[in-house]
Amino acid sequence: MSSAGVHSVAALEELKNVVTKFQTEAKEALAVTDMGVNRSLEWFQNDLLKQWQSEYRKREEAVTNARADLERCRMQSFGDRTPDCTDQKVALKKAQIRLEEAEQKIKAVKKWSRVLEEEVGEYRGPAQELGNVIAGELPKAIADLNRMLLALEAYMSVKAPPGAAVSMAFGNEPSGVQSAAPSAAQGTSSAPASPTPAAAPTAAQTNPPPAGS
């Protein structure tokens, strides 16, 4: 009869519990990561870009207003006296610098949006494979472990037939015990009988009559 080779059903049960816990935690972690990646990409490509585009329009208007202020200042001349428009010039310069900054920000957001989209694409491939394992392979593994545990429990619950417990009482003793009893019986029956003592001689046999009588 072959042996099942089972050393610890508890260890198999623990393995099933570990795999089940990993499936739950991995599924949740993957969902949270996907949500975070998609949210970051959407914020970078839409919200951040729109924010700097709006900021660019505001700063462009500020440049226009600063330039108009400088022109009005220059028009306020009295004779040969040139008006001092230093403040207006400084304000225009600052507005122009801020407009250039917004323009550079827009270019940077568009550039890094493409880079981020490529990186997200590289992430989505392995993430999809992991999702397939979590959704397909792990449930199969857990089902296989459940079937193994049920089979082992059924195997271990099988009892020996009732006749096997009393078989030794009806002549099925081990070979060493079987051979010992007959040997003792044979030794008793085959012992040689003690010799029967001879009859004592009679008086006639020991003292014969005299000759010629």
Image (cartoon, grey):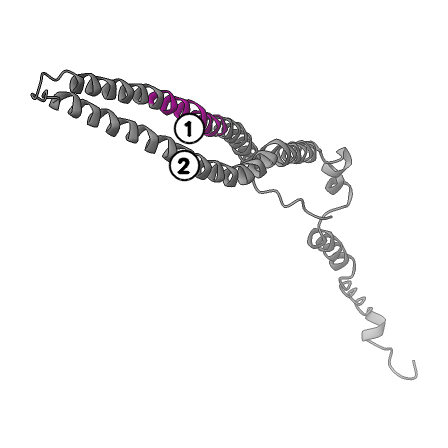
32 sits to left or right of 187:
left
Residue 43 belongs to magenta span? yes
Name the dominant secondary structure of the magenta segment.
helix
Q: Is residue 141 magenta?
A: no
Indicate the amino acid at tag 2. Trp
Q: Amino acid at mark 1?
A: Phe
The residue shown at (37%, 35%) is 108
Where residue 153 sits in the image (x, y, percent)? 66, 32
Please tell me which residue lies in front, 23 or 17. 23
**Figure quadrant of residue 45:** top left
Residue that numbered label 1 is attached to: 44
For label 2, the SS is helix
Q: Which residue is mark 2?
A: 112
Element under label 1? Answer: helix
Measuring from the top left, give residue 206's x and y in whole percent: 81, 74
Question: Taking 89 as reference, is 104 left or right?
Answer: right
Residue range corresponding to the magenta coloring:
34-55
Vertical side of 93 occupied by 120: above or below? below
Apparent side of residue 118 relative to residue 58 in the rendered image (left or right)? right
* Residue farthest to the bottom, as pictured: 211
Which comes before the other along the chain, label 2 or label 1?
A: 1
- Which corner quadrant holds the C terminus? bottom right
- Left/right placement of residue 88 relative to residue 58 reads left
Give the Cα separation between the discs numbered 2 and 1. Answer: 8 Å
